[in-house]
Structure formats: structure tokens, C-alpha cells
Image (cartoon, rainbow, N blue to C red):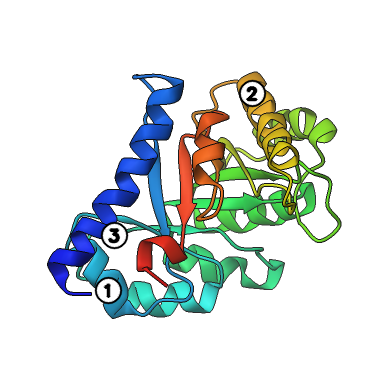
Amino acid sequence: MNEIEYKLYIDNVIRRVETARLKVSDHLIVKIVAVSKYSTAEDIKRLYNIGQRAFGENKVQDLKAKAKELEDLPLEWHFIGNLQKNKINNLLDINPSLFQALDSLELAEELQKKLKAKNMTLECLMQINSAKEESKHGFMPEDTISAYTQIISECPNINLKGVMSIGAHSDDKQVVKKSFETTHAIYKQLPNATICSMGMSGDFELAIECGSNMVRLGSIMFNK
């Protein structure tokens, strides 16, 4: 696919996001985060050249390597993976724009300690395990609001911006939809929350129709 064809291809993806957005509201703004975990720095640069700015990685070492290689570009890096406590300092050295997967109070407490020691703040999203699946990380839906309040109270260096979830692993569209609706309903109850990150390459239109204002698109953005 040459550059002109690739731009037309990405324009079509953006059109799909727009169509889903307009089903909800003219006022809904949806941000696309291109998930580059299976892509090279050259792939990222190619997408940057046609207008994409926000990119997501799910391994600290990969984020570090790509951020270093592309440091001359004004990219917005999101960390979207499970963060091990022993990797917190490595992540903070990169200073991403947003950490999307704060998935436990224990992690929040450890993150707060490290942030305070470095005199830093970090914008974060709480990950919700909206379908209560054993294979996924995140807060249980019934615990999220109280945990959100606790983190705001006890972790001043964590700047909570909202929530993130992964749609239910199911071929039943209604099951997936219910998981998105669960997350969005919680998001609406959280004071000062501005980001509801839901939806990936296979289900982003449904996620937007359920209220997502940030989608994490990997394979579809890199045509893989």
C-alpha cells in the first residue's frame, strides 16, 4: 500500500469513528490512540506523517525503546498494559502522557510513593473489569467508585482522568455491549472524570455508541 492509498485507508477508519460518534451526539469528541505494540518505529512514523499523534504501548521496555527512537517527533505516548510494580520507575522515567491501566489499590499506593519521591504527577485511568472475567485485570464494577474516591484522597500525585475497559470476550454483541454500558455508567458517576476509554479494532464502533470518547486501535490503524 503506497502513501496515498494508506492515507485513504486511514481516512476510512476515521470516517467509521465519525459515523459512530454522530449516532451519539454532534458534541461527542472521540480520540484515537494508535496501539503500536506490534509495529515498528517506522510504522509509527508513517502514521504520524498522515496526522496521528497519540500512540499506545503495553510493555514498558517497548515504550522506552520507541520513545527514544522517535524522540524528535512530538508524540503523545500512552501506556496501556499491565504495570508490574518493579517497572514503575522505568515507566516514570519515560513520563507518558497517560497511564490507562491502573488496576488495583496496591498499584496506586506504590505508584503514589514513586511519584512523590520523584516530585512528579501522572495522569491515569482506572481499569475496570466490566465483564468480571478472570483473564482480565481491573477493578470490579461494584468497587470502582469507592476506589476512585480513595485514590483521589490518598494519592495526590495520581491525577485520575477517568476509566478504561476492554469489552467482554464474547461473540455475542449484546454481552459486549453490556460490558461497555457497565463501564460508561460508572464513568458518568465519577467526579471530574473526562475520559472513557473503550473499544479496540474489532468493537470500537459499538464502544463509541455506548459512550466511549477514546478508542485504542491497533491492527486496523497499521493495516495488519
Mark 3 Cα shell of 10 Å, populated few (<14), some (14-19), many (≥20): some
| Residue beneath disc 2 | 190
Q: Provide the secondary structure element on which disc 3 rests.
A: loop
Say above or below: 56 vs 98.
Answer: below
View extreme (front): residue: 172
Residue at the image point whose x is 56% and y is 72% from the top: 59
On the image, the x and y values in percent for residue 195 come to 50, 34
- The residue tagged 3 is 75
Q: In this rendering, would 19 be left or right of 103?
A: left
Tag 3 near tag 2, CB within 8 Å: no
Q: Residues within 10 Å of mark 2 (few under 14, many from 20)?
A: some
* Vertical placement of residue 124 versus 221, above or below: above
Q: Which mark is residue 184?
A: none
The quadrant of the rendering that contains the C terminus is bottom left
Identify the residue at image location x=20%, y=57%.
8
**Residue 141, x across and y down, in percent:** 79, 35
Q: Is residue 202 above or below residue 212?
A: below
**CB within 8 Å, label 1 to label 2:** no
Mark 1, residue position: 70
- The alpha-carbon separation of the residues under discs 1 and 2 comes to 35 Å
Q: Is residue 215 left or right of residue 207?
A: left
Task: Please say if the residues under marks 1 and 3 sit with CB atoms less than 8 Å apart.
Answer: yes
- Residue nearest the observer in this picture, 27 or 15: 15
Query: Could you say which is closer to the camera, residue 29 or residue 109?
Result: 29
